[in-house]
Each structure stands twice: as C-alpha cells, then as structure tokens.
Image (cartoon, rainbow, N blue to C red):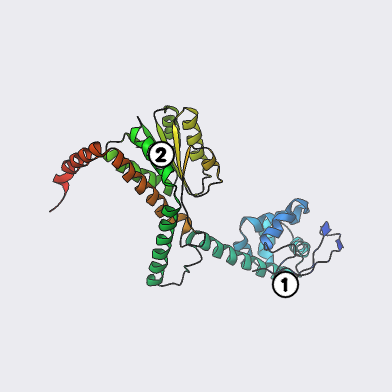
Amino acid sequence: MVQSVGMRTRTSGDSGGPVAAAGAGGAAGGDGGIVDRVGELLPGLPEAQRTVAESLLADPGAAARMTIVDLADSCGVSTGSVTRLCRTLGLPGYSALRLALASDTGRSVAETWQANMGRGISEHDDIRRVAGAISAGVRRAVGETLGALDPAVVERAADAVARARRVEICGAGGSGSMGAEFQQRVYRIGVPAWSWSDAQVALTGAALLGPDDVLVALSHSGRTREVTDLAAEAASRGATTVAVVGDLASPLARRVDLVLPTTVADDGPGHTTILSRHAQMAVLDLLYIAVAQRTYDQSTEAMAATTEAVRPYKQP
C-alpha cells in the first residue's frame, strides 16, 4: 500500500503548481494511492503532464511496466514532462512512480478479489477450506435472513401473491435468475406468474398491472435502476409491490409496499455473488410455501397434474 508522509510545498515553474514532497513509496495527499492522487491533480496540470496523467489513469498497470522513454513516446511528450509530473506528485523520480503504480495495481487486484470473493477466502486456499467457508457463510446468511424476517410482512406478501390476477417478477443479473426460479415454482402451483429477462419487455408488463396484481422485485443492493423503475411503474398502476432486498435504505426498498430483507455479511465468501443468492432463495422458498398453503387445493391438484405430465420423461 502506498504510504504518505509529511508535506511541504514549493513553487515550480515547470509543474505549473505546488509540489508535495513524499517518500519513494508513494505520493502525499492521502491514503488513496498514486492513482487517486493523479486523478485529483489532473484538472490543474499543464497540457503535456495532463497527457501523461491520463495515460496513467487509463492503464496504471501497463504504465508501471514501461520505461520512462516508452511512456513518453506513447504519450507524444518529452521525458522531461514525465519527470516534471513525478515531481508534481511529490515523487523523487520515475522509478518511484513505477513502484507506486505497481503497488496501486496490486492493491486494486486484491480489493477486486475481496469485493467479489470476500476476505475469508484467498486465491491460495485449498478446496476443503473454501468449502468450509462457503458452508459457514451460507448457514449464516440463510439463518440470519430468515430470523430477521417479520412474519406478518411475509404473510401479507403471500396473501397478495395467492390472490393475484397476475404476478410479475423482476431482477437483474443473478437476482434475475432467482426470480426466474421463483416464477417456475409458483407457476407450477397455478399462480399466473411471469419473469422477464429483457428490461423493456418487463416494463411493458409492469405497465399492464393493476390493483389486483403483484410485482415482486429482487435486488441485493436495491440500487439497480431497471428494477427500481419497474417497481415504481407497477406501483403507479396500483399493483402491490414486494421487494426482496438487502438494503433497507435503498431506493427500491423505499418505493415498495412490502419489504422482505436479506441479511448478508460484507466479509462473507462471495457475499454479493454467492451468499446474497442463497439469502434471496431462502426468502423466496418461504414465500412459495406460504403461497402454496393459502392455495392448498389448487396447489396439490396442479402439482399432481404437472408431475404426471413429465413422468414419461423421467428415467427409471
């Protein structure tokens, strides 16, 4: 990680602005790293230095592998302009800039891994350890999610779905996959439900809903614009709107009638791509069974009919 040290400023005729002194390990001005520092200074840089800075921001990893001559040639500037940019950044020379860029690139890779896989799993862990971490994470996510649900809200959502003339289910990415799974389940027990993968088709479906209909929206963040827009459209038509969402302060949670929250730890393994789906499906499983209970005769008849219909395709 790039370290910042004490600052001093001096005027430089070449740099066109103050220069912050820093050690070879990084630039002054905060703990954000050299790339953040370049971005902060970019608007006030002279033209030649700005060209180099833009190249650094576009691909810091590539720049870290270049010699000063290669970087200057690729930007169409002199090596002196590169050196002056280093001084503007508070670095003693180009070698320090390359080290800082390499450090930032490595940190970026680590942060990307942690954001998607969580802090509990490293790229070097064996399969047994990964399996244990996922197992513990899933148990925690599902347990905490179901334990935090308000039974009265689940019952209201199940009542609405059970008596709905039409149910639209929407979600983007992985949440969309969970929505499609839920649609197949409730459709099998006689609930007229649809799930769309195309946002515009889904929007037309939401526009055709009315007071006797339900829209179920899924989003871990609650900040996916398409899903929020679909919920708003359905609500404007008088439909009952239900959200399975991980953030109660999100735009989606604020725009629906009923919120079924999921609880996923930020440091869990694959919290946004793995655990959030398990938490969503746990909520949808509960909702599905609650709907089936409310439509018992219809559900049992439909399940028997569909089981019989696919029986010839099951191998003994």
Disc 1 element: loop
Q: Residue at x 68, y 56 (%)?
A: 75
Q: Position of residue 74 (x, y in %)?
A: 65, 58
Task: Give the side of residue 259 with respect to residue 105, left or right.
Answer: left
Residue hosting label 2: 156
In front: 79, or 255? 255
Instruction: Estimate the spatial distance between the alpha carbons at disc 1 and disc 2, rounded to whole Å.
Output: 62 Å
Image quarter in which the N terminus is found: bottom right
For badge 1, the amino acid type reads: Ala
- Disc assigned to residue 279: none
Q: Quadrant of residue 164?
A: top left
Identify whether 56 is placed above or below 186.
Answer: below
Q: Quadrant of residue 104?
A: bottom right
Which is more N-terminal, label 2 or label 1?
1
Identify whether 211 is placed above or below 306.
Answer: above
Image quarter in which the C terminus is found: bottom left
Q: Is residue 76 visible?
A: no
Task: Give the side of residue 1 with respect to residue 202, left or right.
Answer: right
Disc 2 element: helix
Q: Position of residue 172 (x, y in %)?
A: 45, 44
In front: 237, or 297? 297
Identify whether 88 is placed above or below 229.
Answer: below
Q: Position of residue 46 (x, y in %)?
A: 78, 53
In front: 284, or 99? 284
Q: Residue at x 44, y 72 (%)?
A: 125
Task: Give the side of residue 93 with respect to residue 214, left or right.
Answer: right
User: Can you tell which of label 1 and label 2 is closer to the viewer?
Assistant: 2
Residue hosting label 1: 24
